[in-house]
């Protein structure tokens, strides 16, 4: 099936929270205009029209921020109404990554009615989350988010948890795993906390190091493996992508094999960028109001982005796992390896036998 996905930022970098390590605050601070405001109706409809005319069977509209719900629920209702009006038989899916603090009953109803996949940003247990993810008044947000998760569970909404793996959280794999289990949170994506683009000591204290990565995942994987062998499966994005690779199945996560792809990130003013990590002026590939998606994907900035090289690690030279990595995602790789040490290699070395065992079990089922 031919399909296309767009990552839409209807509220640009606007957010009702003040997270200590916000990567998009860092990205937006490194461009001429930090916030593009709220996406207007003209841009929204141009975006939808551009996708509807493509020769695809399925369109995946994914909303992110900043905090996308800051755009208001009427923005999303209007978006969906217009899609329904102009759709000529394509399958449509919706997803949203949200801090979940604004999810009242109206939002829950909208997500349920239109079968949204909801990603909830939650940094694990209360102590860690409230230290790093505060609202604009400086108050912790754990309690309200957990209450909204309960509402989503009751409504039958499909959701997963996105946890930023910071330097501090990497020291507590047991506590994090126990928290997920205790609260019946079984769909987990852990993303490394990135160092800033230009160096910001206040934010960089939270950045994950390659040693942090290896130490955390060796312990966390053992806990996950023990639970799995007892019949309890927790979906962890990294493991879900790595284990099938032992059966020669390609990973679905972008960048895991060192190859960048055009992601089509649409900012609130219609500017389009190749990757959420590179929503920067130098990588603008055109504007959805004036350029077709075909023109955008052939833009010189897009070509340059796809061709740019990365600096590999010394450990890559004789690495037995190079075919499972090829240097990995060029932005995230700073959390996997430095000039001489690779935490990703250390983790794969540690976990390979157990991962192979699970892969073999999957072939029998």
Image (spheres, helix red, strand yellow):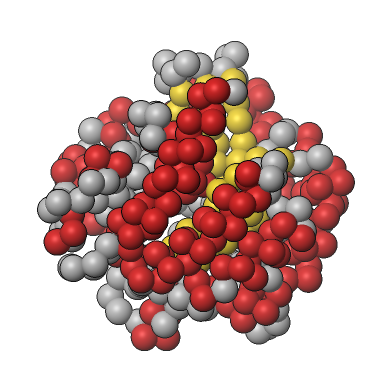
For the point 27% across and 54% down, which residue is it? Answer: 330
For the point 54% across and 29% down, which residue is it? Answer: 362
- In which image quadrant can residue 123 be found? bottom right
The x and y percentages for residue 49 are 49, 28
For the point 41% across and 71% down, which residue is it? Answer: 212
- Depth order, front residue of 180/98: 180
The x and y percentages for residue 40 are 55, 48
The x and y percentages for residue 210 are 34, 68
The x and y percentages for residue 256 are 34, 44
Instruction: Examine the rendered structure and indicate whether residue 54 appears above or below residue 164.
Output: above
Instruction: Examine the rendered structure and indicate whether residue 280 appears above or below residue 73.
Output: below
Quarter the C terminus occupies: top right
- Depth order, front residue of 108/211: 211
For the point 63% across and 44% down, which residue is it? Answer: 229
Residue 273 visible? The answer is no
Query: Residue 168 vs residue 230: left or right?
Result: left
Query: Residue 1 vs residue 225: left or right?
Result: left
Query: Residue 306 vs residue 246: left or right?
Result: left
Query: Residue 102 vs residue 305: left or right?
Result: right
Tag count:
0
- Depth order, front residue of 44/5: 5
Residue 177 visible? The answer is yes
Instruction: Examine the rendered structure and indicate whether residue 357 appears above or below residue 83.
Output: below
């Amino acid at each position: 099936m031919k399909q296309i996905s767009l990552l839409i930022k209807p509220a640009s970098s606007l957010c009702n929270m003040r997270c200590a390590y916000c990567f998009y605050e860092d990205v937006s601070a490194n461009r001429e205009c930090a916030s593009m405001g709220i996406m207007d109706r003209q841009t929204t409809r141009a975006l939808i029209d551009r996708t509807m005319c493509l020769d695809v069977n399925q369109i995946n509209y994914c909303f992110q921020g900043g905090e996308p719900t800051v755009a208001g629920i009427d923005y999303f209702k209007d978006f969906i109404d217009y899609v329904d009006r102009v759709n000529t038989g394509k399958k449509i899916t919706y997803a949203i990554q949200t801090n979940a603090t604004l999810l009242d009953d109206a939002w829950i109803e909208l997500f349920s009615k239109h079968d949204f996949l909801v990603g909830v940003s939650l940094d694990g247990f209360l102590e860690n989350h409230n230290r790093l993810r505060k609202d604009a008044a400086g108050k912790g947000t754990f309690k309200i988010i957990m209450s909204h998760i309960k509402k989503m569970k009751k409504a039958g909404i499909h959701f997963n948890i996105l946890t930023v793996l910071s330097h501090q959280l990497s020291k507590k794999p047991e506590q994090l795993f126990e928290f997920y289990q205790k609260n019946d949170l079984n769909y987990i994506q852990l993303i490394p906390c990135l160092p800033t683009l230009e160096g910001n000591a206040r934010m960089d204290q939270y950045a994950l190091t390659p040693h942090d990565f290896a130490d955390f995942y060796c312990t966390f994987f053992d806990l996950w493996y023990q639970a799995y062998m007892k019949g309890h499966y927790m979906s962890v994005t990294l493991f879900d992508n790595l284990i099938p690779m032992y059966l020669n199945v390609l990973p679905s996560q972008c960048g895991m094999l060192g190859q960048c792809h055009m992601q089509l990130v649409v900012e609130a003013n219609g500017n389009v960028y190749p990757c959420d990590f590179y929503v920067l002026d130098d990588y603008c590939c055109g504007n959805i109001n004036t350029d077709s998606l075909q023109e955008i994907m052939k833009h010189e900035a897009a070509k340059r982005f796809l061709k740019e090289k990365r600096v590999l690690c010394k450990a890559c030279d004789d690495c037995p796992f190079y075919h499972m990595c090829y240097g990995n995602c060029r932005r995230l790789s700073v959390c996997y390896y430095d000039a001489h040490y690779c935490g990703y290699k250390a983790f794969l070395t540690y976990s390979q036998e157990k991962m192979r065992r699970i892969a073999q079990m999957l072939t029998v089922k």
